[in-house]
Image (cartoon, coloured by chain):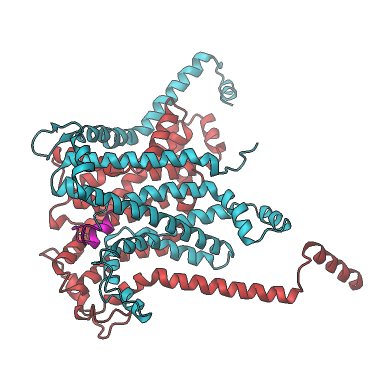
Chain colours: A cyan, B red
Amino acid sequence: MRQLRRTERGKVPTTEGKRSQSRRETVVGYGFLLPWMLGFLGLTVGPMIFSLYLAFTKYNLFTAPEWVGLDNFVRMFTEDPQFMQSVQITLVYVLVGTPIKLAAALAVAMLLNYRNKGSGFFRSSFYAPSLIGASVSVAIVWRAMFSTDGPVDSSLSLFGIELGGWVGNVDLVIPMMILLAVWQFGAPMVIFLAGLKQIPQELYEAAEVDGAGPVRKFRSVTIPMLSSVIFFNLLLETINAFQVFASAFIISNGSGGPAGMTNFYTVYLYKRGFADGQMGYAAAMAWVLVIVVAIIAFILFKTQKSWVHYAGENR
Amino acid sequence: MSTIEVPRAEFLEVATEPRPPRRRRIKSKTVNTIIWFVVLLAITAVILYPLVWLVFSTFKPSSEFGQNPGLIPDNPTVDNYVKVLEGIGGTPLWRFFANSLFIALMAVIGTLFSSALAAYAFARIKFKGAGVLFAAMIGTLLLPFHVIIIPQYIIFNRLELVDTYWPLILPKFLATEAFFVFLIVQFIRNIPRDMDEAARIDGAGHVRIFFSIILPLIKPALITSAIFTFIWTWNDFLGPLLYVNSPEKYPLPIALRLYNDATSTSDYGATVAVSFLALLPILIFFIVFQRFLVDGVATQGLKG
């Protein structure tokens, strides 16, 4: 195509001309990429290297960083019960909340996929919380709804369940945060729905001919055909869940209470770095998070061969 | 004629669907649809209840919180709004709105400009290192943002840009939100190459092709990116929490905390009213543009 064009314009398609053209393309390409490159190097890669260095130092923003080797990491895992607690509650939040959220997203997506008419309205209504879920306003509403004598408590008391508020309750504050996450099932739901629409109807018909019931059809057609979308949602939602911040911060007024039960990983990181001025320690915490996220992504990518089915794979 | 047609139709029906009598099938389908509708309406009610509750609560006097957890205020009042409009700590409420609006609009301009440029390069220009850089960009989607906020803060602090809006706006002009670059790349890849190939034959360079062919064609992707950027920036809490210190420069989410902290025990009404006002532009945006938003998420997820 390119050669044809050149001859049309009356130039001989030599390798020399080709090479100079590809060089020109490279220059233009980097020209277009310049803003992104500046941001990538100056605001992502550079800071990453800097924070990796800080992770091995003691630094309070005012005096020069002091090299302490692995001290920050050792302290984290051996001398900091608050860190261990924040890891624990964050893991509970991620490991319980994400599967529930994805299950709800898939269930509702399948419901919406059943019929086209009218599903647009529901699709939009269910997506709305995903868009505003991380806002301070929603966190404030959530706190009011789950406070003592709030709407949730009073509706439950109609069924004879007396909880006396979720916000100040050590056992209920994480379930409350999980409910806030599940409430935002709309984003993965929209992605599931788009995936469901791409499953060829013939597969279901074929399964039906073979005598498959709804459960069998779900297991043998829906899940395999949707596995790449499940993989994508699982990866993204897990990583997002690790980074919950604003809602936890607002619900406890930045205190992490009650009894440290809303001291989620990033809330604790913020407190160490920006409230206590322990930038080195906070940087070390951030790197532990990066490593955890990288391990999870690695495991998911590794295992996807065994369960993720891509269309056209068996060519 | 009719005598021939009737058996034929019957034959067809039997061949494709040899299922129970027709009338019962239609009935069960209608029943299913009704159940479907009712179930989804019930889910909608639960999902939207917090928002509806918020709207109604703004008309409750502060004394009613804790006494009346229900929807309808016992003594409806607009006092909350009157009080809230005055502002807090000597800063009027409109000021916080104006601050948020300024930051969000600058973020939209910056994101559109820088993301579209980068996306065009990735989607249409063949250059050395494109593959590696594209992978690196996708990688930043998965990178926990917290690993860079500390050094970023230190950098902006060194540059004496803390307590200005630069740390909030500058990154947007440098396409740091990979989500949008990716979204636009996917969109450009779906545009047939015929038009820009033709323009290239006519001697147009990448700059011309970008501005006069691609930009107009990717309008839907740009609108989606603009709405998302606006909403995310409007809602952003951590950024302003770190970088904005003077109350008169506060955007809404941080100002909201001011109401919330100062008055949490005595003045729930004011807090709830500001929460609703802060959410209102987003809700309006959402209602107007929901199709773009939902489709944007759907395409982003699928073609990865």
From the viewer's perspective, is residue B104 above or below residue B73? above
From the viewer's perspective, is residue A260 above or below residue B39? above
**Position of the N terminus of chain B by quadrant:** bottom right
Q: Magenta-highlighted stretch: main secondary structure? A: loop
- Magenta stretch? A245-261
Query: Is B105 or B27 nearer to us in this picture?
Result: B27
Quarter of the image for residue B23 reads bottom right
From the viewer's perspective, is residue A272 above or below residue B291? above
One can see residue B175 in this view:
no
Label count reads: 0
The spot of residue B9 in percent (x, y) is 83, 67
Residue at the image position 48 percent from the left and 34 percent from the top = B124
The spot of residue B102 in percent (x, y) is 25, 54
The spot of residue A71 in percent (x, y) is 18, 35
The spot of residue A270 in percent (x, y) is 21, 49
Which residue is situated farthest in the left direction here? Answer: A63
The answer to whether A217 appears left or right of B266 in the picture is right
Query: Is B119 or A289 nearer to us in this picture?
Result: A289
Judge whether residue A251 is colored magenta: yes
Quarter of the image for residue A127 reads bottom left
One can see residue A232 in this view:
yes
Residue at the image position 28 percent from the left and 49 percent from the top = A87
Judge whether residue A311 is colored magenta: no
Which residue is situated farthest in the bottom direction here? Answer: B74
From the viewer's perspective, is residue A314 above or below residue B258? above
